[in-house]
Image: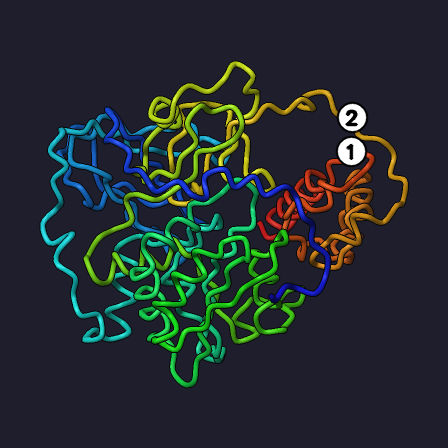
């Protein structure tokens, strides 16, 4: 088994839904579809109040190079376009759709599978862009942009991230077991966009043996390598995955394409297959509903725009002990402030937690034990970054590798003093970015 060289931790896996087949959630009575579900500028609304829309119809158009299209998740009427709570922790402009119950596709969408090999590279990229496909592992970077690196960057390795190293989350695991053909087809489509010899690999943690065996049956005849990875967090982080599979190190200030690599997510590969072969935009996704405080833990396929409250109703009531609801995984996910927040393209899971330390923990003085340094996968000194952030010495902190921190949370997890190290690093990043914007202005 392969793994990355530096740091890492082994939190309890808690994969409670690893053997739970994907269930399709019924259409809710209302959908709230944010125009910001991706990295970059929010999409521009192209519909207005009381418009009738069809399933898959464009309702938000990409606004600029780093942006993504947004589509209606069902047919119905536009009820409102207004700011609404977002799982990212802010308010975002949102299109509300009242379903008509017909669930009718817009003309030309969801057609019979096409022979993608007849398409040119430009046609493939256009289909991916038109479908609004983004990275579904959490970052939400527009996929058509990621698959179009600068001409001077020679890509020789394409990696599919099936690690799913966060505790609780099993959505990618179930996709690999239940839809391997779509995943491999999506990977082949992405590989066709690059010239010259190309190494293609799927990295999967060893705790998903059924997924490894399933994908091997489909991938090996296509000359795609399935790599068994050591179960260790954050194995699925882009830089760590590249290091584990290729041995290459993506340094500070570098991007994966600087090392000849492109990394995509399992869900993204399936969405690419849908977009290119079926003319199907990204309007639903698989996510995990788990945690110790929800009665029925599941992997579900839900429409984009489905509220967390509707998902709770589908999966059974949460217990009265729930004091934290997390969108994503427990290490890098965000606690939501409202059950009205909707599922978006990057929602990998919803966790219902009873956190006894919530609101009670107090940071203590750093004891210089060095545990955060030992586990940091980027080889940084998180304790020092946090100290400098608290002192607001922002010129100094940039020389300590601030930009290289991936905010994985490993340091906070092991800190015996209970220091919120990632919080202080995020705080420093935000203030440094604001200073740079003011200087530019």
Tag 1–tag 2 contact (CB < 8 Å) = yes
Identify the residue shown where x is 88% and y is 45%.
Answer: 369
- Quarter occupied by residue 71: top left
Res 102 seen here: yes
- Quarter occupied by residue 247: bottom right
Neighbour tally class for label 1: few under 14, some 14-19, many 20 plus, Cα within 10 Å? some
Q: Which mark is residue 362?
A: 2
Report the front residue among 383 and 216. Answer: 216
* Residue that badge 1 annotates: 418
Percent x, y for residue 292? 54, 27
Report the front residue among 417 and 55. Answer: 417
| SS category of the residue bearing label 1 | loop
Task: Classify residue 134 as left or right of residue 440.
Answer: left
Count of numbered labels shown in the rendering: 2
The colour scheme applied to this rendered structure is rainbow
Task: Classify residue 376 as left or right of residue 105.
Answer: right
- Quarter occupied by residue 26: top left
């Amino acid at each position: 088994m392969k793994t990355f060289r530096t740091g890492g931790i082994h939190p309890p896996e808690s994969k409670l839904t690893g053997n739970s087949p994907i269930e399709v959630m019924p259409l809710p009575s209302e959908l709230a579809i944010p125009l910001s579900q991706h990295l970059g500028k929010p999409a521009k609304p192209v519909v207005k109040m009381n418009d009738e829309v069809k399933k898959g119809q464009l309702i938000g158009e990409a606004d600029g190079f780093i942006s993504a299209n947004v589509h209606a998740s069902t047919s119905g009427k536009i009820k409102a376009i207004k700011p609404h709570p977002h799982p990212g922790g802010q308010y975002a402009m949102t299109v509300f759709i009242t379903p008509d119950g017909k669930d009718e596709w817009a003309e030309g969408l969801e057609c019979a599978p096409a022979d993608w090999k007849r398409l040119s590279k430009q046609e493939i990229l256009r289909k991916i862009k038109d479908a609004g496909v983004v990275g579904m592992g959490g970052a939400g970077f527009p996929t058509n942009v990621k698959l179009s690196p600068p001409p001077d960057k020679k890509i020789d390795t394409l990696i599919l991230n099936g690690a799913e190293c966060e505790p609780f989350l099993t959505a990618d695991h179930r996709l690999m077991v239940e839809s391997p053909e779509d995943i491999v087809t999506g990977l082949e489509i992405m590989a066709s966009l690059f010239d010259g010899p190309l190494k293609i690999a799927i990295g999967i943690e060893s705790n998903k043996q059924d997924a490894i065996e399933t994908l091997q049956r489909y991938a090996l005849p296509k000359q795609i390598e399935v790599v068994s990875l050591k179960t260790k967090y954050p194995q699925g982080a882009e830089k760590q995955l590249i290091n584990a599979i290729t041995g290459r190190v993506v340094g500070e200030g570098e991007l994966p394409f600087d090392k000849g690599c492109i990394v995509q997510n399992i869900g993204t590969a399936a969405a690419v297959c849908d977009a290119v072969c079926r003319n199907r935009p990204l309007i639903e996704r698989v996510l995990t509903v788990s945690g110790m405080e929800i009665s029925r833990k599941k992997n579900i396929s839900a429409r984009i725009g489905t509220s967390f409250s509707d998902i709770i109703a589908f999966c059974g009531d949460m217990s009265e002990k729930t004091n934290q609801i997390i969108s994503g995984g427990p290490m890098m996910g965000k606690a939501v402030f409202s059950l009205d927040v909707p599922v978006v393209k990057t929602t990998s899971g919803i966790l219902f937690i009873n956190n006894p330390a919530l609101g009670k923990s107090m940071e203590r003085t750093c004891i210089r034990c060095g545990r955060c340094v030992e586990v940091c996968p980027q080889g940084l000194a998180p304790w020092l970054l946090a100290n400098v952030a608290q002192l607001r010495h922002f010129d100094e902190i940039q020389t300590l590798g601030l930009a290289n921190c991936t905010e994985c949370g490993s340091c906070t997890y092991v800190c015996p003093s209970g220091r919120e190290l990632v919080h202080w690093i995020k705080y420093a990043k935000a203030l440094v970015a604001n200073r740079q914007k003011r200087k530019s202005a």
